Image (cartoon, grey):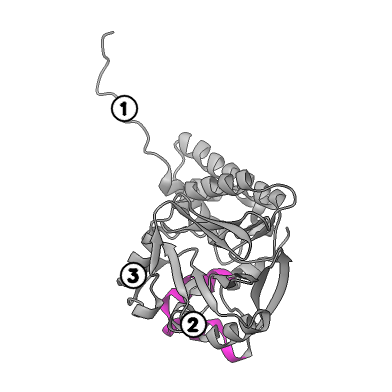
Amino acid sequence: MTVPARFFVSVSVAALCSLLAPRAQAQMGDPTKVTLKTTPVAGGISIIEGANGFAGGNVGVSVGDDGVLVIDDELAPLSPKLRTALAALSKKPVRFVINTHVHGDHTGGNAALGAAGAVIVAHYNVRKRLSATQFLEFMGQKHEIPPSPAEALPVVTFNDDLTFFFNGDEIHVMHVAPAHTDGDAIVHFKKANVIHTGDVFVGSYPIVDHASGGTYEGFVAAADRILALADDATKIIPGHGPVSTKADVAAWRDMLVKLRDRVAALAAQKKTLDEIKAAKPTAEFDAKHAGMIPPDMVVETIYKELPPAPAKAAGKHKR
């Protein structure tokens, strides 16, 4: 899966700035000019994504006799257009909305869909964070995000996993180790053989939201979880970007591990963070994966999460 770096510029800005709604919406462009594109994926599952501008994360939709189930719901200003796109797929009501994590480009439509009767489902940490004031620090800037309104909050939460039997499929929703945030979930449609990953897989350098409990190592664990569920025919809907394959996730996972190991090896040589950045351990991958998340930021994220060097012994010990 090759995705232009300019795509990730818009994604990275939006994914983080969208937390600051409504003030940040001006940074996303004019939402009235954004259109939504719907594409079938497999087995009654479709993807809705933005065109002519940034709409938010990829929306997964299951339609069938039982109604409509939605995974993530884009930025708040796009809610009317999202509801129109959903109505074009099915005249049945939206019964469930699953949030893959807390960020506003994936939860912005909660209020509109929740007020219309949909049951919002997410990991417990998503509700906890949406219910309280959040604090975001990104690229040296600090922001305060107010709590979400009651109608935007998940009303069903889980800690490890839950299963829907809906539209003739078995839909398994699983919490993964903290990666993008501490409330990340992936959604596996077993019969349709489709996985929605949220932002634990996006194809670009990962965004680790430390303020929301994310960790770099969690992305590796999440990729392992996805790979264990997938086969060569599985359609994988990332948080942002085109529908992908198991091979795409495997290549991305290998990239994450290579970067981690390179930074760790340089740190073991007692090199400083600045010296490690100067060594450019990401250079092999920058053309494909860099965007708004600069290579130096990825290096710094990995470096900060490395275990501390063992303390030197004060003196020799007799055996």
Disc 1 and disc 2: Cα gap in Å?
A: 53 Å
Marking on residue 61: none
Disc 1, SS: loop
Q: Quadrant for the C terminus, please.
A: top left
Q: Quadrant of residue 7?
A: bottom right
| Numbered range of the magenta stretch | 11-32
Is residue 158 highlighted in magenta?
A: no
Q: Secondary structure at mark 2?
A: helix
Going by the image, does 43 lie left or right of 82?
right
The one of 141 and 132 positioned closer to us in this rendering: 132
Which structural element holds mark 3? strand
- In the depicted structure, whether residue 314 falls above or below residue 90: above
Task: Return the x and y of residue 241 as percentages of the image width and height.
Answer: 65, 66
| Residue 212 seen | yes
Callout 2 amino acid:
Ala
Residue 102 showing in the rendered view: no
The quadrant of the image that shows the N terminus is bottom right
**Residue farthest to the bottom, as pictured:** 32
Determine which quarter of the picture holds residue 318: top left
Q: Position of residue 30 (x, y in %)?
A: 57, 89
Residue at 36 percent of width and 67 percent of height? 127
Q: Are marks 3 and 1 in contact (CB under 8 Å)?
A: no
Q: Which residue is mark 3?
A: 134
The mark closer to the camera, 1 or 2, is 2
